[in-house]
Image (cartoon, rainbow, N blue to C red):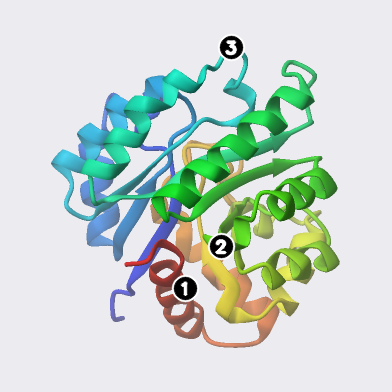
Amino acid sequence: MQIPYIFDTHAHYDDSSFDCDRQEVLDRILKAGVRHFVDVSSEISSMGGILKILAERPEAYGTLGVHPSETHGLKESDFILIRAKIEEEPRIVAVGEIGLDYHYDGTDREEQKKWFSYQIELARSLKKPIVVHSRDAAEDTYRVLMDSGAEEVGGVIHCFSYSIEMAEKFVEMGFYIGIGGVVTFKNAKKLKEIARRIQLGRIVLETDCPYLAPAPHRGERNDSGYLPLIAEEIASLRDISVSEVYGAAWENAHALYGL
């Protein structure tokens, strides 16, 4: 069987769960066909680990930004270094992951919105797409994106968890829909519907590793080697070949990140 060309658009290989075998995992997934991955920032302290991966792995790209759950106590001056690193490192391809997370009560919602808008403006000034984290906050996410002119840069709604109607609204704004391991879960009815119905030209594959491993590996440490399980599920739902999913996702990932 020919080794596919696979692009993991959202991973966290800087996470401490990979400290014991990071290079071995990255060697293995490369041999399995994962030709590129994007290591996505979640907080300012993750910057060093991401830049180190970029220095060591030519197949890697990265993003820089602050996750909504990490926004408490942020200052505008915190973004001076982020801006500088994005400007000087061509393989930093997006601002993210940024957005809104209302699942937990630990971070003030107005504070989240403030820094979401601020980072969208940063992306616009840098002409970079954004990686959007949105959980239990569909309408507010859409409103902030609209009010902030996010359609100028586009990006991806990572780990999509809303309705097909909401997916279509984001796609109309020029965003891609990130589909990961959750699509393989038996109870993921909404995401399966989206994987079946949304235009193939707007789907990108992602793992969010080390989180959200697909079935039958749910609960295990995730990595990009499990992406074929996600592609196979999408192919089955759409009644198309897996190679069609790989091909579209490969092209979509390059378009998303301007590569």
Above or below residue 176? Residue 135 is: above
Return the x and y of residue 74 as percentages of the image width and height.
55, 17
Q: Quadrant of residue 233?
A: bottom right
Task: Provide the secondary structure element on which disc 1 rests.
Answer: helix
Return the x and y of residue 57 as percentages of the image width and height.
18, 46
The disc label shown at residue 252, or none: 1
Spatial distance from mark 3 to mark 2, Cα to Cα?
Answer: 28 Å
Viewer-nearest of labels 3 and 2? 2
- Of the two numbered discs 3 and 1 on the same chain, state the one appearing first in sequence: 3
Return the x and y of residue 71 as percentages of the image width and height.
60, 21
Q: Amino acid at mark 3?
A: Gly
Q: Residue furthest top?
A: 73
Viewer-nearest of labels 3 and 1? 3
Residue drawn at point x = 58 percent, y = 70 percent:
203
The disc label shown at residue 73, or none: 3
Residue drawn at point x = 51 percent, y = 78 percent:
245
- Of the two numbered discs 2 and 1 on the same chain, state the one appearing first in sequence: 2
Task: Provide the secondary structure element on which disc 3 rests.
Answer: loop
Quadrant containing the N terminus in the rendered view = bottom left
Q: Residues within 10 Å of mark 1 (few under 14, many from 20)?
A: many
**Mark 2 vs 1: CB contact within 8 A:** no
| Left or right position of 56 against 41 | left
Task: Provide the secondary structure element on which disc 2 rests.
Answer: helix
Viewer-nearest of labels 2 and 1? 2
Q: Is residue 222 visible?
A: yes
Q: Residues within 10 Å of mark 3 (few under 14, many from 20)?
A: few
Above or below residue 230? Residue 216 is: above
| Left or right position of 68 against 31 | right
Q: Which residue is mark 2?
A: 152
Comparing 245 with 53, the one in front is: 53
